[in-house]
Each structure stands twice: as C-alpha cells, then as structure tokens.
Image (tube, helix red, strand yellow):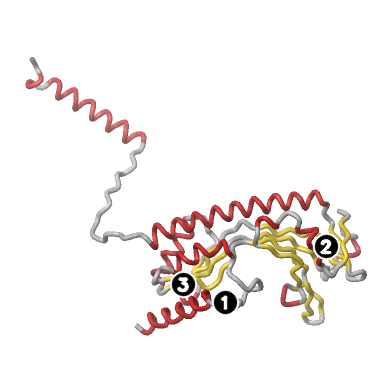
Amino acid sequence: MAAQNAFEQKKRAILNEIDSTQPDLSPKGTIDELCLPIIDLINASADMVTTSSCSGRVSVFLEGTKSYNGEVKIGGKGQGGKWLYVTHDREKVIGWLDELKSKSEFSFELSGKEIPTEKVTGSIRYILYKYEPFILHVKCRDFQAASKLYNTAMSCGFRESGIGSNNLVAIRINIKLDVPLGYLDETSGTLKFFVTPEYVSVLDSLSLSKFDENTRKMQALYDRIEKELINCAPDVNSKVNIMPIETKEERRERKKREGMERQRQLKSPQNVL
C-alpha cells in the first residue's frame, strides 16, 4: 500500500505542475502543444503519469570544447556548446538560416567549400543540424502497467523504447537526422558552412517529411493507448477461439476429404430415387 500511495503522491505533484502557470524546467519552459493530447490521455489513467516530453524538433547546434587530462576535446551543451536555432514548429523549418543570420552573434560564410586540411583537428567545433523525434517518459504504478505501455509503444513502431528504474517507460523512435553543416573558425569567429543553400533546402525537405512521419506515429500511439489501455474493458472469463492457419497442403487434403464425403453421401441409399 505504501508504494501505491507514493505513486499517487508523485502523480498528484506532477499534475499540479502541469496545471501551474509557472514555466517548467525545459529550455522552452512549456509543454509542446502537439504533446498535450497524448499527455492528457495517459494522465487520465490511474496507473500512469507523464514526467517529460518533446513533440519533435529541428535544431542547429554549435559544439563546445572541454579539457580532459590536458587535452582539448569536443564537448556538448555543458562544455560550451550552444543552440543556434531550435523550433518545435513544422512551419518554422524553412527559413531557419535567414533567422539565424539575423540573430546570431557570429558572422557567416556560406560558401560550400570543404574544410582546409590543416584545420581538421580533434578540437574543431562543428555546426550540427539535427532533427529529433517525439519522446515521452511515463512513470507507471507498477511493472505490469509499465509492461503494457511498453508493449503498446513497441507495437506502434517505437522500437527505441524501454523500461527503466522505478517503472519509468521511455517511449522513443528512431527517425532522426544528424548532419554536420560547417564549423566555427575560432580565429575570425565566423561560422563557416561547407554546404550550399541548395543542400540546406534538401535538409529542410527531409525535416518536413520527418515531422509528418513523427505526427503519424504520435497519432498511431495515441489511438493504440486509447483502445488498449484506457478504454479497454476485457472480460477475464471470455475465451477467444482462434482458427489455426492452414498450410497449402493441409487445405488441399481437407478439400479432398470434403469432396470424398460429398460423393459418399450422394451414393448412399437414401439419396437414390
């Protein structure tokens, strides 16, 4: 009973945070609008509560650097990395480069030239273009509830999903993009892109298709959770009869037996006039 009460207390606290007008701990500060329907659906269950989510996003990220044992290595967000552009909105994918140019602290060079060989070192800070799909974390009351949610997600194609400690289910799918676009010239402070504007347009088109696929997957997951976990009312006493699947040989033999039986019945005395 104590574990059950602990889950209910945790769920109540999370729901209060969701209903609050205060910003949450995410960089954006609010729940993505596309996530709200599935969050509301899951939180309607007494056995589940959502803990974090992202509906999918396009981002442009400048790698940072870190020092390890006296050697400079490439680092992520915590080591001087910087988000140059982020959007969760499909409608803001095209035109990101122009917006980045107008707001960035760096100067730009979009030449499509390769990196000079002498500059290709372990400390080069790349500009990375990313598309990251929908992700959802759900805390469940017990392992049985977690297993049901996990199996439902897997059946919808969310093959990167898993169950962690404390019955926390991570629902993930692998429809990502992760492409280097250029690098930071530390000497001049210039973002030098080794891709062309035409290539950027190709990435935009790919990202739009990823957004569309992501939305379809989210809807499929919503429908399956609603049907199998929220609105289901299984009768434990009912029995489902499943007909065995015949092979071609078995079907041929069955048809042969049925034909012979019909012939026997036609030849029986009661069928003779």
Q: Residue 101 carries which label?
A: 2
Q: Distance between the residues labelled 3 and 2?
A: 41 Å
- 187, above or below 273, in the image: below
Q: Do the residues labelled 2 and 1 touch (CB within 8 Å)?
A: no
Q: What residue type is labelled 3?
A: Val
Query: Observer-nearest residue: 101 or 114?
Result: 101
Label 3 Cα neighbours within 10 Å, binned few <14 / some 14-19 / many ≥20: many
- 164, above or below 273, in the image: below
Q: Is mark 2 on a helix, strand or loop?
A: helix
Which of marks 1 and 2 precedes in the sequence?
1
Which of marks 2 and 3 precedes in the sequence?
3
Query: Observer-nearest residue: 101 or 112?
Result: 101
Residue 194: % across, % down:
84, 56
Residue 205: % across, % down:
70, 49
Label 1 Cα neighbours within 10 Å, binned few <14 / some 14-19 / many ≥20: few
Residue 158: % across, % down:
53, 58
Q: Judge from the rendering whether residue 25 lies leftward or rightward of residue 197; answer left or right.
A: left
Q: Judge from the rendering whether residue 115 lies leftward or rightward of residue 266; answer left or right.
A: right
Point out the image quarter for the N terminus.
bottom left
Q: How far apart are marks 3 and 1 (CA)?
A: 19 Å
Q: Judge from the rendering whether residue 263 lies leftward or rightward of residue 149; answer left or right.
A: left
Q: In the image, which is nearer the foreground, mark 3 or mark 1?
A: 1
Which residue appears at 48% of the width and 76% of the height? 15
Q: What residue type is labelled 2?
A: Lys
Q: Which amino acid does label 1 sit on?
A: Thr
Label 2 Cα neighbours within 10 Å, binned few <14 / some 14-19 / many ≥20: some
Q: Which residue lies furthest to the top in this view?
A: 273
Q: In the image, which is nearer the foreground, mark 2 or mark 1?
A: 1
Residue identifier under label 1: 21
Q: Do the residues labelled 3 and 1 touch (CB within 8 Å)?
A: no
Residue identifier under label 3: 49
